[in-house]
Image (tube, grey):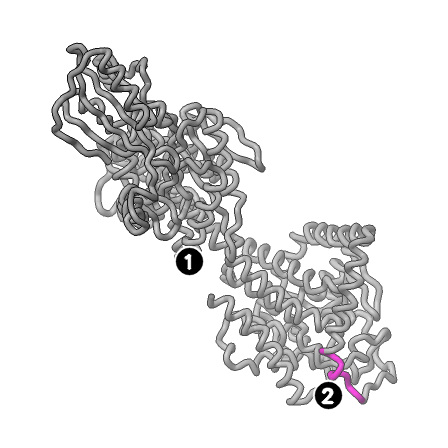
Amino acid sequence: MSAESTEEKDVMSGPEAEEFIEELKKVFSIVRLLDKDNFEHMERHYNEHVEVPCQCYEIWKKKSPCENCISTKTFADGKQRTKLEFIDSKIYQVISRYIEIDGKPYVMELVSQLDENSLVDADGRKRLLKKLAGYNKELYTDVLTGTYNRRYYEEQLKMMREAAGVAMIVLDDFKMYNDTYGHKAGDRVLDTTVQIIRSCIRKSDILVRYGGDEFLLILPDIEEKNFVERLKKIQEEIHKSQIPGYTKLQLSVSIGGVLTDRETVESAVNRADRFMYQAKIQKNMVVTEDGAFQGSNGSFAILNRKRKNHRVLIVDDSEMNRFLLREMIGPEFEILEAENGAECLDMLRRYGTGISLVLLDIVMPVMDGFEVLEKMNKNHWIDDIPVIMISSEDSAAFIRRAYDMGVSDYISRPFDAQVVYRRVMNTIKLYARQRRLINLVTDQVYEKEKNNRMMIGILSEIVEFRNGESGPHVLHINMMTELLLEELVRKTDLYNLTWNDRLLITTASSLHDIGKIGIPESILNKPGKLTKEEFEEMKKHTLIGASMLKNLGMYQNEPLMETAYQICRWHHERYDGKGYPDGLAGEQIPISAQVVSLADVYDALVSERVYKKAYSHDTALQMILNGECGTFNPILLECLKSIHEIVRHEYEKEASKSKDAEKTEDVVARQQQYEKTKEYFFKSISKDIKNPQEDSSGLTEDTGKNFEGGGITGYAGWSDKKESQYSICIGKTLKYQQDNKRK
């Protein structure tokens, strides 16, 4: 803040000036004379960046002359001026007065500290401070984060010349967070980021929200080493942070930083911005003038900033075209080359998704571009590796066919270097962003599916607890079902099973024996052979389970419900029609029930039961293949033969884990406590299900090899009332699952 006056110039001799200065020192804190030499040096400093011998500005704790130097102006036009200067919280009045001493021009500077309480009253002081601070603090504050806003940068910082570290910080994939989790999550991301940055900087440093997801950080008077360390700490702390309420959200920032001496902040920001975009290519990175840094588990490694982060495959039979494309793309990419489609496929097999982009010609020997696209579609490579078609063929038919086969872009010859470069960059960035979005969505889906499986698993465990079967039985059925389905889709297209179909069948397999909740424990856990009557009762578990699911009317049309119903009712049917309860044969049996049936029988054979010892893997396999456990779909038997070594390995691995757990006392103690809690919980649920008229007398039929999934079924005392009660129980569980699915 300064003011001007047109008072007359003072003219005095040397002795008069000395006497005058001594009198002024009684009133002012600082009195000094500045002559022509001082101002010439200042002018040279601005124009040539030379040192100024008289650094009068040091009393203001500055390292360069004031931009609003009133003494320079007063020396030029002879007008007296006044301004206010601040050192910390103190206010000083500065008066610059033109005088001539012995005919030589000078400017006399008079400095005095002001008592702010005596300057104005309380209300006036408040208004004055607001004006000095930029009229209004709110004018320069970002409402959401509390940092300075872009206006503050434009009006107060942009043209400032100060020795400082300048950094541009951008949140990686911020728009994706907003789109995926909502704006509330985006606000929390911004708030968390600002808190972390502030915890890593000094009070004198300046943080500006430069754009929606960008921040400008200015660190005055900082050494290079300290500057880089602070940027690395910011990057590391943000990457380690957790967003309250969004635990799956992984933050990262890309940072570009430069040191500036006498250039404007605007110029430094432009340089830092370029480094920031280099960092953004790889993300979670700090790039400065001396190199690039990327954190990994708390440690940082210096990376070559010119390191090629993306690999581009150029496929063209013309060496000249490959050379031109290589030059157009520039040196920042690692270039692979192929002369024809066959070489292209070899490269794709070798590098896989390590290739960021394929530039593909159409007309080539050995194998043309469209044949390459057919192979990429068949192997699903086109889903992960973008293709830009490069060709002189510009007919609408060719272009439409290329897009129909999944290319991301089509560029016709002759090439424009800038167009090729920008399209390559845009396509790579788009696919990188898409991959990150897929990962985010996959994490969410996985979390919901885990909850769904957990709820179904609890319900299944209730049944297994009453049945006396081993705890891992449901896990084994899930694993076997998944392996059989994967092999089935490899061997045949007969059943047209999508990935989602396979997931539904695997999940629903956990409910295959849910009907056993209505079978008396005396039959379920009988250590000997079942009588004919008991066996008939046991067989009813298929109908009980199906009836329980059917009573969940509001979920009848849900795919999971339909699949679970098929499995519950028909997983004891046999391919030759000799199963139960409906005597279905061949492809009348839904494939879901066929697969779970085979998985259930295998697990029953290799697991110990109250009525039998466990068979070895090889014995169980031979019994199934020889038809000793009923007739199964020949294709499924071929699948079992193909995967039997994988199955053996998975069961052995599971057994090994169980043994290791038993060796750990702490694990045993926790497991015992868990079992006690589980037993109490399950007994509280199942105590009312027992048949008061249990009958275990009479052994009339040898069921030694009738391994119908480890148990068989039936309960004559099952009532509509109890069926309704357990349908409600399952309904609540599946409603929880359905609500999660809809979310």
User: Residue 722, percent across and down?
Assistant: 67, 86
Determine the secondary structure under disc 1.
Answer: helix
Quadrant occupied by the N terminus: top left
Closer to the camera, 219 or 636? 219
Kindly identify the amino acid type of the residue bearing the numbered disc 1. Lys
User: Which residue is found at the position 28% from the left and 22% from the top?
Assistant: 23
User: Which residue is found at the position 24% from the left and 21% from the top?
Assistant: 108
Which stretch appears magenta? 685-692
Residue 417, visible in the rendered structure? yes
Q: Where is 470 relative to 426, above or below?
A: below
> What residue would you read off at disc 2?
716
Confirm whether the magenta stretch covers residue 103: no
Closer to the camera, 684 or 397? 684
Could you tell me how far apart the alpha carbons at marks 2 and 1 are, in whole angstroms?
56 Å
Q: Badge 1, how many Cα within 10 Å: few under 14, some, many 20+?
A: few
Determine the secondary structure under disc 2.
Answer: loop
The image quarter containing residue 508 is: bottom right
Kindly identify the amino acid type of the residue bearing the numbered disc 2. Ala
Closer to the camera, 651 or 282? 282
User: Which residue is found at the position 68% from the left and 68% from the top?
Assistant: 631
Q: Where is 82 relative to 440, above or below?
A: above
> What residue would you read off at disc 1?
184
Q: Where is 690 relative to 453, above or below?
A: below
User: Residue 382, percent across and down?
Assistant: 41, 45
Residue 320, visible in the rendered structure? no
Number of the label disc, if any, that sits on residue 220? none
User: Residue 103, percent across and down?
Assistant: 15, 11
User: Residue 206, percent across and down?
Assistant: 38, 38
Q: Viewer-nearest of labels 2 and 1?
A: 1
The tag earlier along the polypeptide, 2 or 1, is 1
Closer to the camera, 551 or 672? 672
